[in-house]
Amino acid sequence: MTQAPLNIWPAWSKNINIYEVNIRQYTPEGTFNAFSVHLKRLRDMDVDVLWFMPIFPISKTKRKGSLGSYYSVSGYRDINPEFGSKKDFKKLVKSAHDLGLRVIIDWVPNHTGWDHEWIHKRPEFYTLNRDGHITEPLDNQGQLLGWEDVAELNYDNTSMRETMIAEMLYCMAEYNLDGFRQDMAMLVPMDFWEEANRRLRAVKQDILLIAESEDHQHTTTGLFNIIYCWSMHHILNQIAQGKQDVTAIDKWYQDEYPKLTQGAYLFFTSNHDENSWSGSEIERMGEAHQAFAVLTATLNGVPLIYSGQEEPMPQRLKFFDKDDIGFNHYAYADFYSKLLQLKHRNPALWNAFYGGVLMRISPHNHIFAFQRKSDNNTVTVIINLSHQLQIFNADRDIAGEEVFTQRMYNIHTGDNIRMQPWTYLIIQ
């Protein structure tokens, strides 16, 4: 079994952020061409990487809703005609690259839609149930996941594996991609990723590979650069709802963070799953949503912004039908831009081994305060993660400019700072 080399981290991604693009809902037209108008705005907002949800045709068989799920793929080499053509997407990628943006796409390796040509031409590519029929996806315990609109692929079939890798290599070359976000990567055997990612990197060494997984083995083996951090995300939701306090974050850092010996976590307050199924960050986190955006942008991981968060967008977007973000004000664009610029400027906040470790200061049950340092660069973050006034008692001297107000701070050891509910300071 070929083992992937360790510490494969693209140098260009040392201080990146990621912006998830929901093409269907981004504009009234829901097309690549309509989205392209936003490229310069996103670059001006200091976005680095555009992650496009699946761009492929969507199965009509067993379709949910009027348009179906992005993740019910009926072919990996074609483009969803609702979004445009191959020519349109290639033009979009080139325009993004010309602005200095990187482009990755969502890949769906665990299953296909029911009218993918493999269903009839290569049925051996799929998992069969006890009755010998192709089955919808199962979890790792063999239980149905409730995804009846898709059919599970069979990774015991070596020909299917080879074909899947060929499809990825085709798309990477055809569209000049900078990487992949692998949907439900934890349901796909690890030895497949050893082979697939080795071959992808053999063609393009500095691609960015993200696993939708919390299995640390996906990064500790060097197979992927980034894994998800649902566990932290759930903690943040609970703190916002008054069900936990800052000590839960401290415990997570004590118990979970040491398991990530290389690579980086993806931190977020929203994404396509959270928004549609659990609610927007404003619905889930209420007045706390900006405080948690500050936290996820400054923790030692890669920050993710979902389509519409810069508007902001309080509503849930429909998943299987046409909806519209309704861009109009971009009221949070400057807020997010300041956070993204902060990460670009400060090596202490960079990703993976490039950045500084997180050091807690002035331990408190409701104020999460920390510093990250790299050589002569230090960033201090102080956030009141509660709905009540709290007092921050400094246990060290802190001096510098606050990012949002440009106010100069000169805090001495022992000084007290009154922090209103859900407020924050970032001092650099």
Image: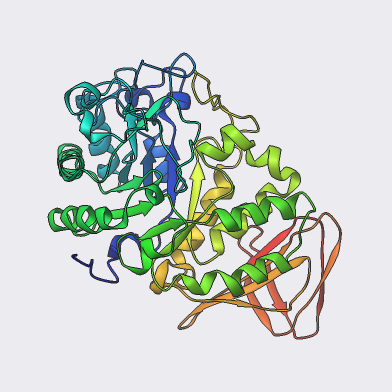
Asked if residue 379 shows in the view, the reply is yes
**Who's the residue at 57% across and 40% down the image?**
274
Left-right relation of 262 to 165: right
Please say if 139 is above or below 59: below
Please indicate whether residue 206 sits to the left or right of residue 355 in the image.
left
Quarter of the figure that contains the N terminus: bottom left
Residue 347, horizontal then vertical, whole percent: 44, 71
Tell me the quarter of the image containing the C terminus. bottom right
Image spot of residue 379 (x, y percent) = 57, 72
Q: Can residue 428 be spotted in the picture?
A: no
In terms of depth relative to the viewer, which is nearer, 122 or 377? 122
Give x and y (percent) for residue 60: 36, 15
- Furthest toward the front, the residue is 131
Decide which of 345, 279 is in the foreground and name it. Answer: 279
Q: Quadrant of residue 103?
A: top left
Q: Picture quarter containing residue 42?
A: top left
Measured along the vertical axis of the image, is residue 289 above or below residue 31? below
Q: Residue sitting at 61 percent across and 38 percent down?
A: 331
**Residue reaching furthest to the right:** 389
In the foreground, 264 or 68: 68
The residue lying at 47 percent from left, 57 percent from top is 214
Q: Is residue 145 left or right of residue 133?
A: right
